[in-house]
């Protein structure tokens, strides 16, 4: 709920005869608090003229000004210019010399005159008037004299009255009645800061000093749910399987995630294990559970070299293969139309080759070139299979977002190769985004300097995100997890396995730091990233404890007992 209070006396300062049409002089100062402490580093922007933006200093103070040398003293000493004060229920006037009769009118926001007062010529002391009983709402006080008209906004709440700054001009009170446009001069300042709800505060003067604004932190409830914590940034997803969506993991899933993807249940082997034999019930149960909890659903995956049954390729010419591909995509996407908002259409189609045209895997030392994976798809249909898959997907559900999904995008060469065909897809309006898998490690390989993981830096990931976004593509982080092992020993050597059931403090801290630095970067790029999906919920159920060697791993945000790890706290802490 919006809670903005303006308290403390507003001391008004203005140039008495400035014409309405002139660019206004701006000098607004104030303090932003959360009710107890000053809010530092909030950004205060004048809505109508964003050149006037300031960042609050350590005491939460801000100044928007196009005047140099303006200071509190200057304003406070300009006694002549402090024209109207509100104290309790009385308005006090300080009429400058040279102004004779002044009429004061109290209007409703729609311009109806409630009461008229005459201040006369008596300028000894401060003339004052008692306000009538007013119901809550917005009112205007206008002072008109033979020289000028001044308007102040009066806000009446159940407990207090606030007199705001001014708009000055030569219009008269009857002008207000005629036009009804009483708020013409009212601008707003906008206050933004991570973890606070953005506020807009009406100001009717560009010359307000000591504006005090209560700025509401996001609620405690938001602070304990991961996806709510990230509601201003991107969706937070989790991969679930046929059990985790409904067993003890489900409550974590529903509390902390607002996007889901099936870990295996929408792969070809699961959905069409034999020709024409579509099996949707498991995936449907999962998708429906996600949707009834208000989640978005990502679909994974339509065309992949892995987890695709052999029959798809058996005896297949290019045309036969494309017929099977189109049929699969069209049936699957129709089944989940309106439920799955984004599909990984093609997955992992690019690898690195050495001199002998062999896949180099992780060892970049022998890398010669990047190219298409020599999958059965590629052997039968070449790169056309990628375009065919995207065309079929676009036709099957024009409203779904279509993604190319892959790993190691932080390697420049791999990314350049991906971009070469993704650009063509984009030109043909066949693709909407890229999925960056992000199966990361706790740190870069220490010994194997040529290992791909040596390039898993925040800078490199940020660069890949920016480069893809610059192509006009959505960016989803699709399969995030951070293995506690470096890539130095992807081995079966059990002596190097971490076998304690619980992750010790040192590992917890290191993992938390790594998660935090990536999430800090993701948030910095929230204008480019729409979804960050974790590849699992908790460490008792992670593919990394099976792949590559059965070595136990602890790569997720919740531990084996389904309790949040330090990594969870770390990414909530900003
Ligand atoms: C993995 C699943 O997590 C495992 O359960 C399964 O045995 C193999 O596939 N990249 C992908 C995912 O695109 O589909 C993979 O999922 C992990 C790597």
Image (tube, rainbow, N blue to C red):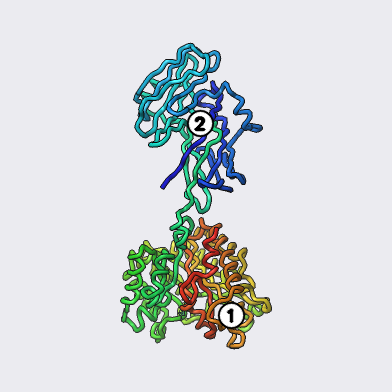
Task: Check the image and report above or below for 493 versus 465.
Answer: below
Q: Residues within 10 Å of mark 2 (few under 14, many from 20)?
A: many
Task: Check the image and report above or below for 97 versus 198.
Answer: above
Secondary element type, mark 1? loop
Mark 2, residue position: 205
Mark 1, residue position: 361
Which of the 4 image quadrants contains residue 371? bottom right
Say the numbered circle drawn on residue 3. none
Task: Check the image and report above or below for 456 versus 175.
Answer: below
Residue drawn at x 60%, y 34% as measured from the top left:
66
Residue drawn at x 51%, y 57% as measured from the top left:
526
Q: Estimate the spatial distance between the alpha carbons at disc 1 and disc 2, rounded to whole Å.
A: 65 Å
Secondary element type, mark 2? loop
Q: Residue 200, position in %: x, y?
A: 47, 42
Q: Residues within 10 Å of mark 1 (few under 14, many from 20)?
A: some
Q: Is there a contact, CB below 8 Å, between mark 1 and mark 2?
A: no
Which of the 4 image quadrants contains residue 30? top right
Q: Residue 418, position in %: x, y?
A: 54, 69
The answer, for residue 427, to whether it is visible in the render is no
Q: Residue 425, position in %: x, y?
A: 47, 65
Residue drawn at x 53%, y 28% as measured from the top left:
12
């Amino acid at each position: 709920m919006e809670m903005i209070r303006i308290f403390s006396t507003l001391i008004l300062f203005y140039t008495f005869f400035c014409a309405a049409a002139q660019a206004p002089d701006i000098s607004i100062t104030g303090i932003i608090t959360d009710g107890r402490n000053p809010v530092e580093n909030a950004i205060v922007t004048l809505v109508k003229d964003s050149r006037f933006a300031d960042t609050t200093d350590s005491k939460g103070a801000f100044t928007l000004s196009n005047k140099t040398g303006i200071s509190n003293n200057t304003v406070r000493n300009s006694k002549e210019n402090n024209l109207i004060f509100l104290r309790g229920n009385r308005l006090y006037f300080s009429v400058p010399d040279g102004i004779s009769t002044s009429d004061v009118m109290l209007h409703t926001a729609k311009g109806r005159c409630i009461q008229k007062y005459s201040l006369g010529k008596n300028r000894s002391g401060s003339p004052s008037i008692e306000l009538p009983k007013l119901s809550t709402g917005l009112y205007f006080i206008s002072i008109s004299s033979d020289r000028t008209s001044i308007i102040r906004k009066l806000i009446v709440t159940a407990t207090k009255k606030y007199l705001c700054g001014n708009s000055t001009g030569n219009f008269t009170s009857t002008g207000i009645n005629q036009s009804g446009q009483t708020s013409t001069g009212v601008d707003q300042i906008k206050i933004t800061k991570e973890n606070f709800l953005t506020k807009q505060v009406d100001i009717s003067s560009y010359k307000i000093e000591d504006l005090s604004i209560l700025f509401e932190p996001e609620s405690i409830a938001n602070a304990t749910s991961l996806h709510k914590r990230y509601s201003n940034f991107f969706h937070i997803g989790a991969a679930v399987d046929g059990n985790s969506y409904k067993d003890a993991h489900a409550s974590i899933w529903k509390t902390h995630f607002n996007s889901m993807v099936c870990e295996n249940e929408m792969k070809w082997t699961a959905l069409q294990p034999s020709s024409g034999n579509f099996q949707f019930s498991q995936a449907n149960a999962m998708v429906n559970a996600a949707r009834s909890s208000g989640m978005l659903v990502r679909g994974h995956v339509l065309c992949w070299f892995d987890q695709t049954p052999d029959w798809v390729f058996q005896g297949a010419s290019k045309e036969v293969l494309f017929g099977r591909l189109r049929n699969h995509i069209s049936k699957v996407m129709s089944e989940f139309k309106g439920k799955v908002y984004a599909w990984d259409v093609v997955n992992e189609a690019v690898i690195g080759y050495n001199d002998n045209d062999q896949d180099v895997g992780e060892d970049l030392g022998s890398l010669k070139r990047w190219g298409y994976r020599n999958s059965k798809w590629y052997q039968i249909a070449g790169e056309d299979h990628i375009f065919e898959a995207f065309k079929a997907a676009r036709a099957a559900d024009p409203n779904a977002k279509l993604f190319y999904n892959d790993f190691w995008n932080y390697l420049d060469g791999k990314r350049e190769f991906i971009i070469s065909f993704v650009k063509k897809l984009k030109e043909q309006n066949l693709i909407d985004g890229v999925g960056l898998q992000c199966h990361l490690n706790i740190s870069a390989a220490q010994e194997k300097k040529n290992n791909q993981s040596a390039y898993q830096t925040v800078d490199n990931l940020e660069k890949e995100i920016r480069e893809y976004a610059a192509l006009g593509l959505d960016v989803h982080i699709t399969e995030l997890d951070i293995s506690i092992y470096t890539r130095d020993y992807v081995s079966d050597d059990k002596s190097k396995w971490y076998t304690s059931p619980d992750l010790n403090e040192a590992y917890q801290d290191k993992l938390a730091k790594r998660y935090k630095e990536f999430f800090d970067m993701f948030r910095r790029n929230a204008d480019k990233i729409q979804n960050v999906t974790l590849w699992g919920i908790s460490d008792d159920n992670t593919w990394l404890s099976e792949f590559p060697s059965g070595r136990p791993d602890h790569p997720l945000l919740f531990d084996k007992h389904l309790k949040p790890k330090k990594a969870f706290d770390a990414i909530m802490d900003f």
